[in-house]
Amino acid sequence: MKLNITLLALVTGILFSCSPDNDEINIYDDSADRIIVIDGGTTGDPTATSYQTDLMAGQHIISGIVGVDVVDDNVVVSYSTDGDWVIDETHLYIGPLSQLPTTGSGNPKVGHFPYKDTFSTGVTNVEYVGPGITEGECVYIAAHAVVTNTVTGQTETAWGNGDPIGGNSWAMMFEYCY
């Protein structure tokens, strides 16, 4: 047991001593098919993605961007806020349109989206590694967030800019093809 603790401490020390200097890297592996990287630890510059769209808060305010790329044949979706905006919650759907969780009237059921998290202190970057994808395949992405402006205290629902999902809400989605 003492050897295991010593080995764990040694490995942890090596990992942190070789890491770039960044105080806010948090990585959570919540399931076999998802990894969330929060603040400072994204796999790259969100503007270098193969697709990006505005993260629209309250329908008309650009609060950041949603980026999409494929890494190791997996769809990677990143949320990144601009200016004084931070992310309090995320809800993300990646998959076929026919499986997008909606109510009978067509409104999205964000609580049923497979990728979701709440952050007790607002964060500026969140990244999800989603399902596998093959070249030529397309998926629909509905990227929802709750964002707060740290200066004004204004809290808004935000969506990755795209086409209306339906129902009587302003929820949006977009199609991504690899």
Image (cartoon, grey):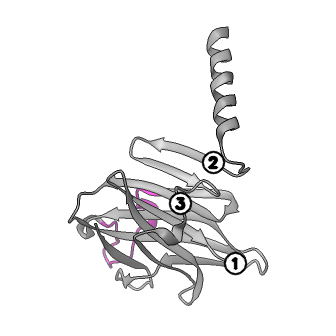
Residue 26's label in the rendered image is 2
Q: Residue at x 36, y 77 (%)?
A: 174
Which quarter of the image is occupied by the C terminus? bottom left
Mark-to-mark CA distance, 2 and 1: 21 Å
N-term-proximal mark, 3 vs 1: 3
Q: Mark 3 — residue?
A: 44
Which of the 4 image quadrants contains residue 97?
Answer: bottom left
User: What is the span of residues highlighted in magenta in the rendered image?
Assistant: 100-115
Q: Report the amino acid beneath label 3.
A: Gly
Sequence-wise, which precedes: disc 2 or disc 3? 2
Residue highlighted by disc 1: 83
Residue at image x 48%, y 69%? 48
Disc 2 or 1, which lies upstream in sequence? 2
Badge 2 element: strand
Taken as a whole, is the magenta stretch helix, strand or loop?
Answer: loop
Q: Where is residue 132 drawn, in percent x and y?
A: 30, 53
Q: Is residue 59 left or right of residue 155?
A: left
| Residue 32 spot, x, y in % from top left | 40, 41
